[in-house]
Image: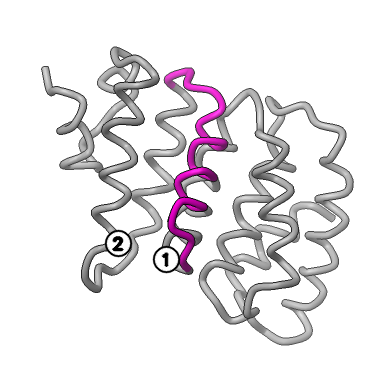
Amino acid sequence: MKVPNEIFANAKDVNESAISVFSRAELLDSLLPWLDSWLVGSHYLDFEVFHYIGILIADAGFERIDADLLRWYRHDASAKRYEIMCDFLWGYWKSAKTADPETVSTLLGSLDQLPKTSGGYGMSLLALHSFVASRRIKSEEKEKVRANLLRHLEYLRETGLHEGTASFLEELR
């Protein structure tokens, strides 16, 4: 069996059962340094890996990891950290039972602040789409977030930006 700090070394080979044996603290002790490793150099951000790991961690039953990711982002905020956080949340909120209200609010607030051509903007939209579309997460904020996403969808359609993201948002109509 792998020790926690090695679990994400080959992220695409990780599965839910490998993650579920660890405590929350052990998981975070492995996850956060692994995410940090993507910040060094000029790594291409493989959104599929972060998305996949987010789903696995939620499927393994770890809740409120979104709040931990927000703290991780805020510790040394950067565009790259933000995009990684949103990539992860895009997957995580698909399977999580809860969503941290402050994390949702942060992403929602960022939509009007971020450059519309940025990866962070597109990934924020996808993460928030997962939050709204989730049948597991119960939140009074869903309708407000949905309305904002539809407003941004109109912008994407008018400008032709983030066409793949726009197709996901169409599901909310």
Label pair 1/2, CB-CB below 8 angstroms: yes
The furthest residue to the left: 1
Q: Can you give x and y, in whole percent of width and height, for residue 12 in the image?
A: 24, 42
Q: Around disc 2, counting alpha carbons within 10 Å, would you say few (fewer than 14), some (14 to 19), or many (20 or more)?
A: some
Q: Relative to 111, is 64 on the left or the right?
A: left
Residue 132, image x and y in percent?
Answer: 74, 43
> Residue 119: x percent and y percent?
51, 71
Where 132 sits versus 156, above or below?
A: above
The magenta region covers 60-78
The residue depicted at 54 percent of the width and 45 percent of the height is 70
Q: What amino acid is found at the position of numbered circle 1 in the picture?
A: Lys
Q: Earlier in the sequence, mark 1 or mark 2?
A: 2
Pick the front one: 154 or 107: 107
Placement of 117 over or under 63, stated as above or below:
below
Looking at the rendered structure, the secondary structure element under dot 2 is: loop
Which class describes the residues within 10 Å of circle 1: few (<14), some (14-19), or many (20+)?
some
- Seen from the viewer's position, the closer of residues 151 and 69 is 69
Q: Label 2: which residue?
A: 39
Q: Residue 6: horizontal and vertical position, in percent?
A: 15, 33
Q: Is residue 165 left or right of residue 79?
A: right
Considering the image in quadrants, where does the N terminus appear? top left
Whether the magenta-drawn stretch holds residue 69 is answered as yes
Q: Does the magenta-highlighted stretch encompass residue 146?
A: no
Residue occupied by mark 1: 80
Image quarter of residue 67:
top right
Tell me the kind of residue under disc 2.
Leu
For image coordinates 85% across by 67% down, the residue present is 151
Q: Is residue 4 above or below residue 147?
A: above
- Under tag 1, what secondary structure? helix
Give the residue displayed 72% in from the left and 87% down from the top: 159
Q: Quadrant of residue 9?
A: top left
Name the outermost residue toward the front.
75
